[in-house]
């Protein structure tokens, strides 16, 4: 499989869909895919709905090294594709649609898309997170013209170029290591005075000589005419500004939960993450949450997979006892 693509050729069409399902799962990241494996294997009629691309955030990760069973690591898109194949083997139907509306509060849940209404006995919300914007001048203007949030997707376009990465957490350094396969140089910019990533990632980055670090710096603008040509950063201690020539800017400054489409039906924490118990039950009976969209401390593929398994088991129990 090509590292920069993933298959969606097995998508069900509207004509293939039933009017009612035992379980509808919203989101085809590791949590949703795992939940679908468990529910379909339990002979629950399962529909998996994904708004964008198979795998969610993991699909944009070049190398997943901390998921058990892959000693050499695995490409995130390939991992997601394997999960989908396993799920479809047990009968999961998959569609790629943008949900128009949801009614989660009724005993029978209703999901609408393409002017079609699907009923569900239970719903598992696993729609994950999206990268945060910087909200600075030039970011929106140059999106797709030098500004990116996915090195795996866009890194090869910057072969032999100078690139900046904003954010020195795990994601920033993981994607930086991937970018080093292509770029001439990397400029790493971190708002905090220290690198936030795991030490193993820091050690790997420090073996490369073509990296310049700007800790305790804030990016204030992305500059250019038709495409990115430079960034302006500011030292947070001295307030001194500096302009750095770059051809691309990759942004990793945190994540936003994808919960806006839920409206005010379900209880969220102050950051917008879904509140749920250890059985993944939300504030609405029969509605469960799994993966990065939950209010929890650790957001990793392994914890998302665990959440998905628990949510599926809870959904099965709910259906059997309703």
Image (cartoon, rainbow, N blue to C red):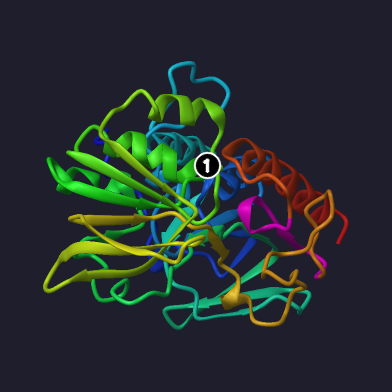
Q: Which residues are magenta?
A: 284-295
Magenta segment includes 164: no
Relative image position of residue 257 (x, y in whole percent): 59, 64
Quadrant position of residue 222: bottom left
On the rendered structure, is 93 left or right of 26?
left
Relative image position of residue 275 (x, y in whole percent): 78, 63
Q: Which residue is mark 1?
A: 195
Residue at the far front: name it.
Answer: 238
On the rendered structure, is 311 left or right of 143?
right
Q: As rendered, which of 121 and 149 lies closer to the eye?
A: 149
Magenta segment includes 292: yes
**Would you say residue 266 is visible in this rendering?**
yes
Q: Residue at x 43, y 17 (%)?
A: 72
Relative image position of residue 136 (x, y in whole percent): 38, 74
Label 1: how many Cα within 10 Å (few below 14, some 14–19, many 20+): many
On the rendered structure, is 121 left or right of 253?
right
Quarter holding the N terminus?
A: top left
Quadrant position of residue 294: bottom right
Q: As rendered, which of 194 and 228 lies closer to the eye?
A: 194
Q: Residue at x 57, y 39 (%)?
A: 301
Q: Residue at x 73, y 52 (%)?
A: 296
Kind of element beneath mark 1: loop
Q: As rendered, which of 175 and 137 lies closer to the eye?
A: 137
Q: Is residue 62 above or below residue 117?
A: above
Q: Residue at x 70, y 82 (%)?
A: 264
């Amino acid at each position: 499989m090509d590292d920069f693509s993933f298959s969606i050729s097995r998508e069900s069409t509207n004509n293939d869909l039933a009017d009612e399902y035992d379980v509808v799962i919203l989101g085809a990241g590791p949590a949703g895919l795992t939940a679908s494996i468990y529910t379909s294997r339990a002979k629950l009629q399962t529909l998996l709905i994904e708004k964008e691309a198979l795998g969610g955030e993991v699909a944009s990760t070049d190398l997943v090294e901390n998921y058990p069973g892959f000693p050499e690591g695995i490409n995130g898109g390939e991992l997601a594709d394997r999960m989908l194949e396993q799920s479809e083997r047990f009968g999961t139907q998959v569609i790629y649609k943008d949900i128009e509306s949801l009614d989660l509060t009724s005993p029978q849940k209703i999901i609408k898309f393409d002017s079609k209404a699907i009923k569900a006995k239970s719903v598992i919300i696993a729609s994950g997170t999206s990268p945060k914007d910087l909200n600075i001048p030039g970011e929106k203007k140059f999106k797709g013209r030098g500004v990116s949030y996915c090195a795996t997707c866009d890194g090869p376009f910057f072969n032999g170029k100078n690139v900046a990465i904003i954010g020195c957490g795990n994601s920033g350094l993981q994607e930086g290591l991937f970018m080093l396969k292509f770029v001439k140089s990397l400029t790493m910019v971190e708002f905090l005075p220290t690198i936030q990533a795991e030490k193993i990632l820091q050690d790997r980055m420090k073996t490369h000589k073509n990296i310049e670090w700007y800790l305790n710096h804030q990016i204030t603008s992305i500059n250019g005419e038709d495409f990115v040509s430079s960034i302006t950063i500011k030292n947070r201690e001295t307030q001194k500004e500096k302009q750095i020539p770059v051809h691309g800017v990759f942004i990793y400054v945190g994540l936003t939960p994808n919960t806006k489409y839920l409206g005010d039906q379900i209880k969220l924490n102050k950051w917008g993450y879904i509140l749920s118990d250890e059985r993944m039950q939300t504030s609405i009976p029969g509605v469960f949450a799994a993966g990065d969209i939950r209010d929890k401390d650790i957001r990793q593929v392994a914890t998302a997979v665990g959440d998905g398994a628990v949510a599926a088991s809870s959904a099965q129990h709910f259906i059997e006892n309703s």
